[in-house]
Amino acid sequence: MYATERQQQIESLIATDGRVAVVELARRFGVTTETVRRDLDQLETSGLLQRVHGGAIARTRMSTAEPSLAERSTRRSDAKLAIAARALDAVPAGFTGSVYLDAGTTTAALAGLLAQRAPGFAPMEVVTHSMTIAHLLAGATGLGLTAIGGRVRGLTAAAVGAQTVDAVSRLRPDIAFIGTNGLSAGFGLSTPDPDEAAVKRAIIAAARRVIVVADADKLDAELLVSFGSASDVDILVTDRSPAEPLAMALADADAEVWLA
C-alpha cells in the first residue's frame, strides 16, 4: 500500500472514530510504528489531525475546540433527541420535584420535550442558566421556571461567572441533567471553558442526582477543563455503549448507562 492510500485511510478512521492509535494502525497496515508516526506527522502538518501521546485525534477534539451553539444544534440532532427522550424516563408522570437543566443542545432537546408534556403530568419546577432553554420553557404549561442570571457567554448562550456559581450553590435540585463536551475514564467530564466548568461543577455539587446526557462523539474526548469524575455521575444517557476503559470507570463508580 502506498503512503498516500494509507494516509487517506487514516483520515477516514479519524473522521469515524475521532482518534487513532499508532500501534493499532501499524498492525492494521502491516508497517512499522515509525512509518505510522511519519504518516501522522505529515497529516498533522497538513492540518488534518492533532498528534497526541500514542496516536492522534481529530482537530475538532482539541482541548479548546468549541463550535457555536448554532453549529452544534445541527450536529447529530436525531441522536440528541433520542437521548433526551430516554433521559426523560428519569422524570416520571407523578414527579413533583425540581429539575436543573444545564446549558447545551441535548439538554435543550430535553427542555423541548418537557414543554410538550401532556397537561395531565404533575407540575414541576425547572431551573436553568441557559438563555436558550429559559426561552423554550417560558410559559410552558405545568412547569415553574427559574432562570439563573449572570454574564451571558455568547458562544453558548449560558450565564457564567461568580454570580451564577453563587446562585447555583444555594440550590438543591432533585435531578440535574448535565451536558458535557467530553467524558473519559482518566479525565472525567470536561469542557473547553473554565467559566462554564465552574458552573457545571456547582450544579453537580448541588444536585441530589446527576444525569449526564452525551452523544457518542463526547465519549473518550478530553477538553481543557475537568469539572467532574465518573464518581459524580449517577446515570449516563448516550447512544452508544462506552468502550473500555470508560465502561469500567463508570461501572466502578456504580454509574448506570442508559442507551437511547
Image (tube, rainbow, N blue to C red):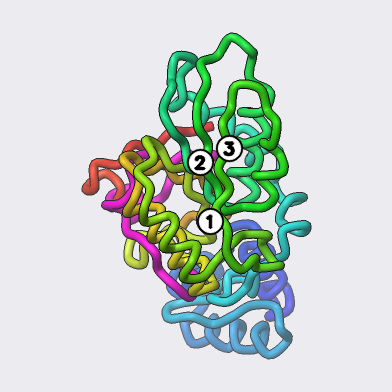
Badge 2 crowding class, 10 Å Cα cut-off, few under 14, some 14 to 19, many 20 or more, is: many
Q: Is residue 105 magenta?
A: no
- Amino acid beneath label 2: Thr
Instruction: Name the side, left or right, on which 102 lies relative to 246.
Output: right
- Between disc 3 and disc 2, whose residue precedes? 3
- Amino acid beneath label 1: Lys
**Residues rendered magenta in the picture:** 222-249
Residue 56, quarter of picture: bottom right
Q: Are marks 2 and 1 in contact (CB under 8 Å)?
A: yes
Spatial CA span between label 1 and label 3? 29 Å
Q: Residue tagged by mark 1?
A: 218
Instruction: Name the side, left or right, on which 47 lies relative to 158.
Output: right
Q: Residue tagged by mark 2?
A: 238
Q: Which mark is residue 145?
A: 3
Spatial CA span between label 2 and label 1? 9 Å
Q: Which mark is residue 172?
A: none
Q: Secondary structure at mark 2?
A: strand
Badge 3 crowding class, 10 Å Cα cut-off, few under 14, some 14 to 19, many 20 or more, is: some
Spatial CA span between label 3 and label 2? 26 Å
